[in-house]
């Protein structure tokens, strides 16, 4: 299994556990259960966007690794000065 798949399964278990906790605490009648219900509902709303934001950030930061930087430098050296890398036109 890849790291990505393991992280996805862990996130599903976490979110499923939060939904289950919300359901259980909703039926209990005590001050502690009420505060746990509020915490579970808050986490159910906040955790998925935080995970999504983390994944987007990692994708953005992970794109420009050292190998990709070297590849870009090699391509720009092959084209020569004054050439646009996307169209091959000179400026």
Image (cartoon, rainbow, N blue to C red):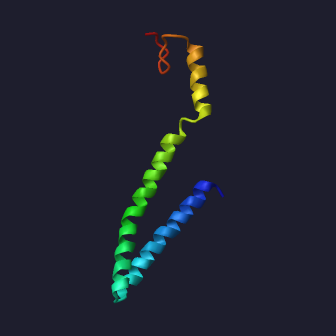
Give the x, y percent position of residue 52. 44, 54
Give the x, y percent position of residue 33. 37, 84
- At 44% from the left edge and 78% from the top edge, which residue is drawn? 20
Q: Is residue 86 above or below residue 54?
A: above
Q: How many marks?
A: 0
Q: Is residue 33 above or below residue 13?
A: below
Quarter of the figure that contains the N terminus: bottom right
Q: Nearer the viewer, residue 46 or 88?
A: 46
Give the x, y percent position of residue 70. 61, 27
Q: Is residue 4 above or below residue 73?
A: below
When asked about the image quadrant of residue 66, the answer is top right
- At 35% from the left edge and 79% from the top edge, which residue is drawn? 35
Q: Residue furthest bottom?
A: 29
Give the x, y percent position of residue 82. 48, 10
When asked about the image quadrant of residue 43, the answer is bottom left
Q: Is residue 25 above or below residue 15?
A: below
- At 55% from the left edge and 11% from the top edge, which residue is drawn? 80
For this view, does 35 lie left or right of residue 80? left
Quarter of the figure that contains the C terminus: top left
For this view, does 39 lie left or right of residue 68? left
Q: Residue furthest front?
A: 32
Q: Nearer the viewer, residue 34 or 89?
A: 34
């Amino acid at each position: 299994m890849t790291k990505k798949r393991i992280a996805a399964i862990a996130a599903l278990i976490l979110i499923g556990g939060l939904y289950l906790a919300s359901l259980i605490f909703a039926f209990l009648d005590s001050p502690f259960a009420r505060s746990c219900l509020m915490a579970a509902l808050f986490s159910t709303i906040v955790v998925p966007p935080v995970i999504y934001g983390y994944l987007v950030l990692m994708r953005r930061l992970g794109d420009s690794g050292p190998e990709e930087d070297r590849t870009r430098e090699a391509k720009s050296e092959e084209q020569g000065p004054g050439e646009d890398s996307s169209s091959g036109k000179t400026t």
